Every structure is written in structure tokens, then in C-alpha cells.
Amino acid sequence: MEAEASYGKVTPSEYLSRINNLLNKEDEEQMLLREDYEIGMDEFGTLSINYSASCTKCKFKYNYDHTVSVP
């Protein structure tokens, strides 16, 4: 790892900058898949399930919607 190899060889502020850049890059890579969901029932006994997922890197998208009347 570049930041680890630079420890003690660059100024403290440069080392911290490299660590922050690495952490920001890891955050961006982990935020590729977004998932949203909602599950609920209304006053008439209708159960609704809504789910969606999308990937910002590969452009994958998936949606699931289901509604059923509960007796």
C-alpha cells in the first residue's frame, strides 16, 4: 500500500493526506450497490412490498413490487 510505504518518509501532513485519499477511495468503491425497500399495510388490509437495487458501476437495476389483500 502506497500510504503505508510512505510512513516516515514524507511529512506528517502528506502521510495523512494519503491515508484520507485511501479512505475516500474505499468509501466510493463500497457505495456501488444501493438498495431501497418499503413494506407496509394500509387501513384496508392491503400489504405492499417494494424493493429496488441499482449499481452505479455496472448499471444493474432491479425492481420488485408486490401487493396483496390480507383477509
Image (tube, helix red, strand yellow):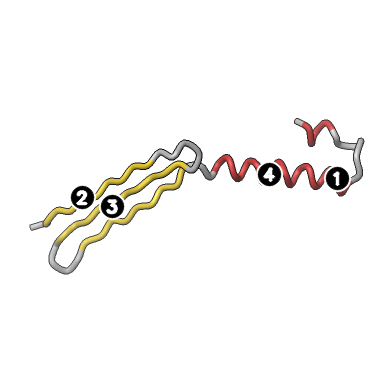
Query: Which quadrant does the C terminus fall into?
Result: bottom left
- Per the image, the residue denoted by label 4 is 23
Residue shown at the point (63%, 41%) measured from the top left: 26
Badge 4 element: helix
| Residue topped by disc 3 | 50
Q: CA distance from mark 2 to mark 3?
A: 7 Å
Residue that mark 2 sits on: 66
| Mark 2 surroundings within 10 Å by alpha-carbon count, few (fewer than 14), some (14 through 19), many (20 or more) | few
Residue found 92% across the figure and 36% down from its top: 9
| CB within 8 Å, label 2 to label 3 | yes
Which sits earlier in the primary sequence, circle 2 or circle 3?
3
Left or right: 51, with 4 as reference point: left
Residue 55 horizontal/vertical position (percent): 45, 41
Number of the label disc, if any, that sits on residue 14: 1
Q: Identify which residue is drawn at 46% across, 36% down.
A: 58
Q: Which of pointers 4 and 2 lies earlier in the amino acid sequence? A: 4
Horizontal and vertical percent position of residue 17: 80, 47
The image shows residue 44 at horizontal and vertical percentages of 13, 66
Task: State if disc 3 and disc 4 touch (CB < 8 Å).
Answer: no
